[in-house]
Image (cartoon, grey):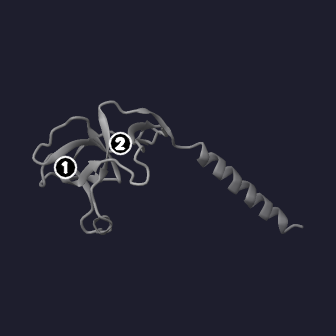
Amino acid sequence: MKTMIPLVASLALVGLGSTASASGLHAVRPVQGYTCMALNQTQEQAMDFEHPASFRQGPSDNAADAGLAGAQIAVKTGADPVNGYLPTLRTDFKPAWVKASLVKPYTVASDPKARCIPAVMSDGSQGFMYPRN
């Protein structure tokens, strides 16, 4: 019976942890003026850890690295490329630039109605919401 107590306590903690994470990070509101785009990469390119898709601090191949780009990217709506780069936001809302050839409109092959919208998340970071229509 004494060996059951730690097991029951462990299961209770696991249950509490899953409840906390279920009510965790979520989209609060859309980010105005930005459009969701997706990385334009093959699976092989995405697995090339020597040349990852990254943000730049300016619109130039010579600009300093500003972090890794995720699968979805918030690109300034209607912006024209500058030197082949588009203005974007990092997850901390700091401005950055992404090579225009690295992004494409967000689509989901299995669901043509799927949408992605840049959003402010409950922790204050920039993320995405995926409304169901």
Quadrant where the image shows the N terminus:
bottom right
What's under tag 2, amino acid-wise?
Asp
Residue 16 visible (yes or no): yes
Image vertical order of residue 75 relative to residue 43, above or below: above
Residue toward you, 109 or 84: 109
Choose the circle earlier in sequence order: 2 or 1.
2
Residue depicted at x 30% and y 53%: 69
Say which of marks 2 and 1 sits in front.
1
Q: Secondary structure at mark 1?
A: helix
Question: In the image, what residue occupies the spot 29% across and 64% down?
Answer: 42
State the SS at label 2. loop
Quadrant hosting residue 53: bottom left
Q: Which residue is mark 2?
A: 92
Residue beneath the point at 23% across and 54% down: 102
Classify residue 14 as left or right of residue 55: right
The residue where tag 1 is placed is 100
Residue sitting nearer the eye, 8 or 70: 70
